[in-house]
Image (spheres, rainbow, N blue to C red):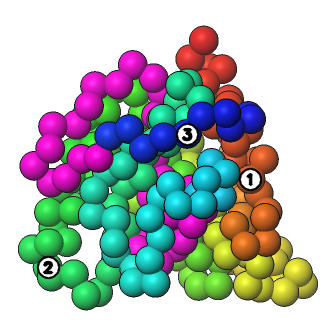
Amino acid sequence: MQIQYAELETVCGITSTLPENQLPEVAFAGRSNAGKSTLINFLLGRKGLAHTSSQPGKTQTINYYNVNRQIYLVDIPGYGYARAGQKEMEKWGDLVERYLTTSEMLRAVFLLVDIRHDPSEQDRQMLDWIRYLELQPIVLATKCDKVNRSQLSEKLDRIGEVLQLSDEDILLPVSALGKQGREDVLDLMLQVVENEG
């Protein structure tokens, strides 16, 4: 998939009505520090499109990026951010759950996990959600530039083991900094577009 157009089209907070889109959607989910915004900018080829911050947990809204007027990349709030209050975290959780359970056009969920750490309990819960929605898990192991090449397959095996991924599930190493995995992810998004046709 060649990116010719990418714009932030809709932003939804806790009280917002979620849009009823006519185009297919792929959601990006993960812990607050998994590098979601950086990866989205890398994929879409636009540096400041998704706001990045040194402080995790900044995305508190669901952000819909219109890509090539063919598909929406939907950035959902990160989870597991310790500084957010319990009530705030519950509201974010409700918002994410509302999106996952009511979107008519959701076709895939990309789960981002930091390759340097074992997936968390919340990562496993998100994977359960993906399976519950009868979607094929696609796990993106982010920040793969931070591990030695010799460690890469060991780290990927560990993620697969902790998340109990099957041979059918997709696990890809990606890195915005190392410019790795972009074509693989965009190809998966293109498959979603083509399947709609």
Q: Residue at x 57, y 82 (%)?
A: 118
Instruction: Please identify the quadrant where the N terminus is shown.
Output: top right
Residue 127 visible in the picture: no
Q: How many residues crowd mark 2 within 10 Å: few (<14), some (14–19), many (20+)?
A: few
Please report whichever mark, 2 or 3, sits nearer to the chain's N-terminal start. Answer: 3
Residue type indicated by callout 3:
Ala
Q: Quadrant of the C terminus?
A: top right
Q: Kindly check if marks 2 and 3 are in contact, taking CB atoms under 8 A apart as contact.
A: no
Could you say which is closer to the camera, residue 118 or residue 23?
23
Give the mark toward the camera: 2 or 3.
3
Q: Amino acid at mark 2?
A: Gln
In the depicted view, which residue is nearer to us: 172 or 39?
Answer: 39
Counting residues from the N terminus, which is met first, the one under dot 1 or under dot 3?
3
Question: Could you tell me residue 96's position as x and y percent?
Answer: 27, 53
Q: Nearer the viewer, mark 2 or mark 1?
A: 1
Q: Nearer the viewer, mark 1 or mark 3?
A: 3
- Badge 1: residue crowd in 10 Å (few <14, some 14–19, many ≥20): some
Q: Locate residue 66 relative to residue 181 in the image: left or right.
A: left
Q: What kind of element bears circle 3?
A: strand
Asked whether the residues under the numbered discs 2 and 1 touch, taking CB atoms below 8 Å apart as contact, a structural biologist would say no
Which x, y percent locates residue 98? Answer: 21, 45
Q: Which residue is mark 2?
A: 86
The stretch of residues the image draws in magenta is 11-40
Q: Is residue 124 magenta?
A: no
Q: Position of residue 34 (x, y in %)?
A: 52, 73
**Mark 1 and mark 3 residues within 8 Å of each other at the beta carbon:** no
Label 1: state its secondary structure: helix
Q: Secondary structure at mark 2?
A: helix
Residue under label 1: 182
